[in-house]
Amino acid sequence: MTGAPSLGTDELIYDWNEIGRKGRLIPRDITFFDETLRDGLQNPSVADPNIESKLKLIHLMAKIGIHCADIGLPGSSQRAFEDVLRMCREITDNHLPLRVACAGRTVVSDITPMIEISQRAGIPVEVYCFIGSSPIRQFAEEWDVATIAKRSAEAIDVAVKAGLPVAYVTEDTTRSRPDMLATLFKMAIDHGASRLCVCDTVGHATPDGVRNLITFTKSIIAGTGAKVGIDWHGHNDRGLALENALWALEFGADRVHGCALGIGERVGNAAMELILLNLKLLGLLEHQDLTHLLEYCNTAAQAVGWEVPINYPLVGRDAFRTATGVHAAAIIKAQNKGDAWLADRIYSGVPAGMFGRKQEICVGYMSGASNVNYWLRQRRIEPSKELVEAILQRAKGSNHILTDEEILAVVAEVNAR
């Protein structure tokens, strides 16, 4: 049996998350914007992946349902330009259902390489042009509103004249004044920007801040009468990036940004895989296949030289492992019923199989005979009473989960008697 059991799921799992739920009323036409190959690479501890890894990642982005990916800053170096061009050609050659974007400052020299790439690859490149808008940034840079607006308008005009869609990015939006944002947002819309990107650049926002800022942005757009999308781009300095991303969608953003494994500058961005995981479990991505999500994360980790914490949700080594006797016994009983649905949920709030993983039962100092019997049968070893007792004795005398090699050594000792 692989589907839900004969009893209704509401009879087996009482879901307090749904009682009086007012949030997560998210429209069907939201889109996901992957920043792994742009903002993710600004993390000071990662490596810039080789082009083969980048190509593999964009294929996986398409598989997990990413709609658009920021694939770099082509104006920053010749290598960056060539990698972006190669990725664009890979998308067109393979007809991948993935739109592309590039980032650049609000200077013409950053926009023109995107225009060239678009023309050479035969693919529209969405221009994400950014400039700081907060008072603290203005003070440090010695900018005034007229300077920011002029530079922004000139950059947007160049992209729009070339026929490219533009998203106007106000860096540090979550610490910017309403009058400043109103001026810049109206200017961007007047000059043809089709999206406004609201940025929590330094991870300052709380959910209340997200609500207030997106509500404000929606009101500015409504006042212009234009049809303009709203992006939410958040960082994790307060540990709120995932929560803020989910709330941003509920409050009215129609596109949310994330990076694989939450990599990014300082402590990182919202984790794309956790955004997708939570929306899936909330029943909002009913038809989206996320069984490649693990491969997407592992590919990104390998490409940038990232070590995934063992307790990281979904991807970490221990995400679906247990060595505790009572937990393992419950999983085994469910499996013995021939019920994969039940076994995947009896001791897990995240069904492993939904995301390309499986439940694992180990043997350690808190294990019981059920763990040992299961471990042996999984490897087609007959679990005699003597063997089970010997393995348990070794496990109880240890201070860690036994490795496969340690258990097999006990098996060899017992068989040699």
Image: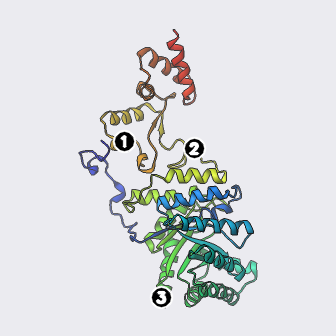
List the residue tagged with mark 1: 346
List the residue tagged with mark 3: 226
What colour scheme was applied to this rendering of the protein?
A: rainbow
**Residue at mark 1 to residue at mark 2: CA–CA distance:** 22 Å
Disc 2 crowd, CA 10 A, few/some/many (<14, 14-19, 20+):
few
**Is the C-beta separation of discs 3 and 1 under 8 Å?**
no
Disc 3 crowd rating (10 Å Cα; few below 14, some 14-19, many 20+) is some
- Pick whichever of labels 2 and 3 is earlier in the sequence: 3
**Left or right side of 289 for 77:** right
Is 362 located above or below residue 271 in the figure? above
- Relative vertical location of residue 321 with respect to residue 135 in this rendering, above or below: above
* Disc 2: which residue: 310
Q: Farthest residue in the front direction? A: 93
Helix, strand or loop at mark 1: loop
**In the drawing, what numbered circle is on residue 401?**
none
| Residue at 48% over, 58% down | 63
Along the line of sight, the residue nearer the viewer: 134 or 231: 231
At 50% from the left edge and 13% from the top edge, which residue is drawn? 415
Amino acid type assigned to the residue bearing label 3 in the image: Ala
Residue 402, horizontal then vertical, whole percent: 55, 28
